[in-house]
């Protein structure tokens, strides 16, 4: 780019042979790109509106890449010099012996607190050949007592131990394990966990639970389509014919929450969603997403957008919904999410007066019933793409109608295709107007 800039300064503009730039004898400069052609009527306009800007952006990009390379190089050298350490009891509490005045003057108090933090939790895996499924813990069903043997041979007992959730499951598994004659072949391991919370102990029993054999797979009454988002679950009640019945959203906030709190919040919303499906007697349809790459974020994107991507606990959402649905006997089906938001935005957002997420949930529900989203007739007036797959058509139209969502809401009325597209909308930006003029000029 610098060589091209220098050639323009000398009055003998030249371009490398492997580029798509052309210079006409009249002084017009053109650049052929795969999907568009850029034209500058004078050398001056090309030099200042494109070339200078391109050089500036390239320098800035190189600077950012160099900065990132230096940081990664420093990180590599640091990892090569020292092995990262792990502290049981948290590094924050370990460092507090030097940073907090109360622990500096009273070190024994810190040692007591740090020792408690290091040993606050214990989990013992089960063994299927043990009498009660575990060689350390034994649960007495009749007395409802849990006893375990310490490493010094002492036996400790927790009397009147009852589980508010799953007591019948624990009783059944322990009773079946005791009665089992061939434990090495048919036995089931039972794991136990104890957490010390100071004024009380939290005891957990972990067993494998058989899946519910009574699952409602029937779509004869329709389905509940669900669109998962970082701050809410949008749902739509879809009839068996693929028609819209009702919609809503289950809102929540995960900002500033720890992993455990996020899990509890999502489990509570999953309970509400599955209860809705049970009342409607319909299975749930979700989109099958892979957020592995999107969660890494864009290095040069806004902090707010990257934070939202990171907060999107999709895997936890799906696990919470599937676990609750299995318990309540509701089937959960996952479909390909391709172009569900785009087709829902363009076809159903204005038609039903719903949000873009509820429109996407409606499309997801229809796809779960086996329906396809065809491009509406209002678009075919401007560009007939009937020889392509409908997903390809949605991809093209999404690029052609690159306008903001709230503006698109008023541009097209799919119920009145003869009105066409309102390309002179007052809220369109200049860039959006150019795209609309190009689209409308294509007609005919």
Image: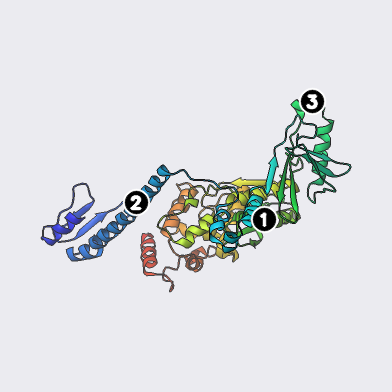
In the image, residue 305 sits, relative to residue 393, either above or below, namely below
The x, y position of residue 213, in whole percent, is 76, 40
Q: CA distance from mark 2 to mark 3?
A: 62 Å
- Mark sitting on residue 264: 1
What is the crowding at mark 1: few (fewer than 14 residues within 10 Å), some, or many (at least 20)? few
Q: Of residues 359 and 172, which is closer to you in this image?
A: 172
What is the crowding at mark 3: few (fewer than 14 residues within 10 Å), some, or many (at least 20)? few
Tell me, yes or no, if residue 242 can be seen here: no
In the image, residue 225 sits, relative to residue 40, either above or below, namely above
> How many circles with numbers are drawn on the protein?
3
Q: Secondary structure at mark 2?
A: helix
Going 21% across and 46% down the picture, which residue do you hit? 18
Which residue bears the numbered disc 3?
A: 182
In the image, taking residue 369 as reference, residue 304 lies left or right, namely left
Tell me, yes or no, if residue 289 can be seen here: yes
In the image, taking residue 444 as reference, residue 366 lies left or right, namely right
- Mark sitting on residue 351: none
Q: Of residues 87 and 419, which is closer to you in this image?
A: 87
Q: CA distance from mark 1 to mark 3?
A: 39 Å
In the image, residue 245 sits, relative to residue 367, either above or below, namely below
User: Of tags 2 and 1, which is closer to the observer?
Assistant: 2
The x, y position of residue 59, in whole percent, is 27, 57
Ranked by sequence position, the earlier of labels 1 and 3 is: 3
Going 48% across and 62% down the picture, which residue do you hit? 304
- Mark sitting on residue 70: 2
Ranked by sequence position, the earlier of labels 2 and 3 is: 2
What is the crowding at mark 2: few (fewer than 14 residues within 10 Å), some, or many (at least 20)? few
Ranked by sequence position, the earlier of labels 2 and 1 is: 2
The x, y position of residue 179, in whole percent, is 84, 31
Q: Secondary structure at mark 3?
A: loop
The x, y position of residue 282, in whole percent, is 71, 51
């Amino acid at each position: 780019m610098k060589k091209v800039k220098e050639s323009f300064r000398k009055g003998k503009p030249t371009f490398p042979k492997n580029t798509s730039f052309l210079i006409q004898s009249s002084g017009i400069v053109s650049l052929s790109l795969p999907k568009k052609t850029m034209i500058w009527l004078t050398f001056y306009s090309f030099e200042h509106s494109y070339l200078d800007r391109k050089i500036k952006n390239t320098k800035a990009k190189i600077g950012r890449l160099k900065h990132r390379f230096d940081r990664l190089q420093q990180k590599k050298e640091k990892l090569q010099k020292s092995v990262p350490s792990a502290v049981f009891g948290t590094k924050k509490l370990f460092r507090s012996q030097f940073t907090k005045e109360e622990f500096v003057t009273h070190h024994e108090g810190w040692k007591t607190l740090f020792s408690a933090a290091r040993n606050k939790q214990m989990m013992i895996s089960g063994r299927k050949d043990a009498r009660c499924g575990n060689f350390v813990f034994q649960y007495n069903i009749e007395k409802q007592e849990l006893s375990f043997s310490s490493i010094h041979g002492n036996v400790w007992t927790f009397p009147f131990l009852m589980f508010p959730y799953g007591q019948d499951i624990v009783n059944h598994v322990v009773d079946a394990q005791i009665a089992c004659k061939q434990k090495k072949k048919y036995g089931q391991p039972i794991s136990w966990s104890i957490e010390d919370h100071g004024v009380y102990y939290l005891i957990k029993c972990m067993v494998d639970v058989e899946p519910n054999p009574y699952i409602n797979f029937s779509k004869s009454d329709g389905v509940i389509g669900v669109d998962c988002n970082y701050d809410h679950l949008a749902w739509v009640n879809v009839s068996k014919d693929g028609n819209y019945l009702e919609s809503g959203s289950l809102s929540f906030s995960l900002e500033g929450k720890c992993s455990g709190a996020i899990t509890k919040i999502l489990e509570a919303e999953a309970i509400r969603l599955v209860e809705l499906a049970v009342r409607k007697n319909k299975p749930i349809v979700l989109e099958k997403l892979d957020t592995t790459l999107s969660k890494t974020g864009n290095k040069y994107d806004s902090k707010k957008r990257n934070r939202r991507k990171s907060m999107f606990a999709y895997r936890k959402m799906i696990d919470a919904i599937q676990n609750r649905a299995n318990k309540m006997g509701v089937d959960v089906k996952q479909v390909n999410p391709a172009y569900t938001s785009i087709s829902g935005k363009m076809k159903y957002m204005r038609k039903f007066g719903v949000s873009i997420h509820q429109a996407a949930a409606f499309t997801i529900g229809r796809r779960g019933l086996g329906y396809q989203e065809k491009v509406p007739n209002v678009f075919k007036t401007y560009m007939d793409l009937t020889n392509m797959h409908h997903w390809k058509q949605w991809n093209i139209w999404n690029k052609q109608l690159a306008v903001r969502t709230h503006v698109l809401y008023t541009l097209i009325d799919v119920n009145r295709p003869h009105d066409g597209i309102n390309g002179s909308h007052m809220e369109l930006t200049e860039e959006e107007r150019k795209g609309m003029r190009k689209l409308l000029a294509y007609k005919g």
